[in-house]
Amino acid sequence: MKTWLMLISITVLGISACSTGDREPSPPPATKTAEPTDVIDEELMVSLAQAKNFHRKAKVYMSDGNLAAATASVRQILSLRFPKGAPEADDVRLDARALLAKLLVSQNQLEEAMRTVDEGLAQNTRESFFVANLYTVQGEIHEARAAVAEGEGEPGKAKVAEERRAAIASYDRSIQINEKLQKQLVDEK
Amino acid sequence: MPSNDDDFLTAGIPEPDAEATPSERMHARTFADIIDKTLTNKTPAAMSADDRALVEVATVIRASHGQMELAPAKQRSIVEDALRQAIGGAAANTSGAVTPIGKARSKRWVPWAMTAMTTTIAAAAVLVLWLRAPRTQYIDKPEVAKLPETWRSRPVDPLIGPIARESAGDASSRIDYIFADRLDGYRDRRLSGRARGGKP
């Protein structure tokens, strides 16, 4: 009797071992769901909406002639939090820097304007039409600097030539990027 | 020598030729009855301590002379039982049934067969567990689920295109355009997710 009980127990154990083997271990997921940075989510939309509002606010200040307030409003766009890795963040910030630099130029803050542009170009990780636009603004700043140096008379002549050469280089860089990107877009179509 | 018929064990020994007293005769007849009943396995439950001692002595004397024999059926049963236990079987005392020796010998292989079978099953189970152990799969780069382009966060270059110099500072118009485009994609994703019953 004992032997039979043992036999039955071992058989049951063996069958259960086989049956557990039938259940394949759940394989690790081969497909991952889209990361939050891959899709347009609430966080991105909120950030874009805030950038839009700051631009509207700056526009109102500009129409009112309050350039300092407009500048402060545009500066706030640079400190907005976007979803990590969102490409829109780079583009929106570069565009804000371009506007900010132009506002600073209009207030004769040429060095601050150039610093704003240089920071934007330094932080840039990819070429875009917004980078090209920033080079265009950089060229305008060089032109403004040349105009200031021209006002200094004879001593500023060398500075004028240097700033104009720099302006041309910036415009060339802008044109180069625009052409490259346009060609890419045409090829993709 | 005084004689005490009621206590003949402790009384003095009578003369060899002495005539038995009536009391002795009656006691002898009573004891003879007890011995007869003992021989037929009907030993009286109640008897005096002296009689019980004498019965035991008589039984020992009779057994030592080889005059006690078991019934043939009982003898066969005991022998079969002993043989069965010798080959590993269970004793059949309780049932009294006797298994022929030949039949018992033919079942000698059963324990060995059972042991072999259980060992084989256990070995097979171990082998199956070992062979069918889950393999660890490594996926270097999981594929990202395909999403419609309009649902994805992406550069806005194709949307805006080249920025003319006279529009360099017109970021306000561009952000409106960017926001409107992304809002379309966001709404589309949300509504499509709900339509499919999934989490957007």
Image (cartoon, helix red, strand yellow):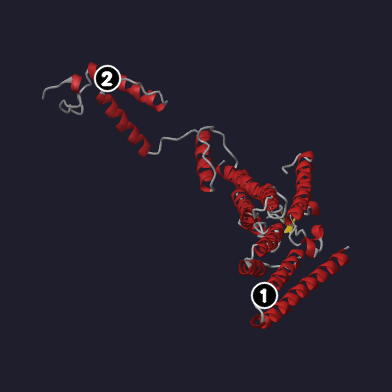
Residue A127 image-quadrant placement: bottom right
Residue B60 image-quadrant placement: top left
In the depicted view, which residue is nearer to us: B158 or B99? B158
Which element type, helix, strand or loop, lies under badge 1? Answer: loop
Residue type, label 2: His
Q: Quadrant of the C terminus of chain A?
A: bottom right
The answer for how far apart the CA atoms under marks 2 and 1 are is 166 Å
B75 sits left or right of B11 in the view? right
Closer to viewer: mark 2 or mark 1? 1
Mark 2 surroundings within 10 Å by alpha-carbon count, few (fewer than 14), some (14 through 19), many (20 or more): some
Residue B187 location (% of width, % of height): 77, 44
A29 sits left or right of A179 in the view? left
Query: Disc 2 is attached to a residue of which chain?
Result: B
The residue that label 1 is drawn on is A151
**Going 54% across and 48% down the picture, which residue do you hit?**
B87
Residue A161 location (% of width, % of height): 71, 81
Mark 1 surroundings within 10 Å by alpha-carbon count, few (fewer than 14), some (14 through 19), many (20 or more): few
In the depicted view, which residue is nearer to us: B139 or A76? A76
Please give the label number shown on residue B27: 2
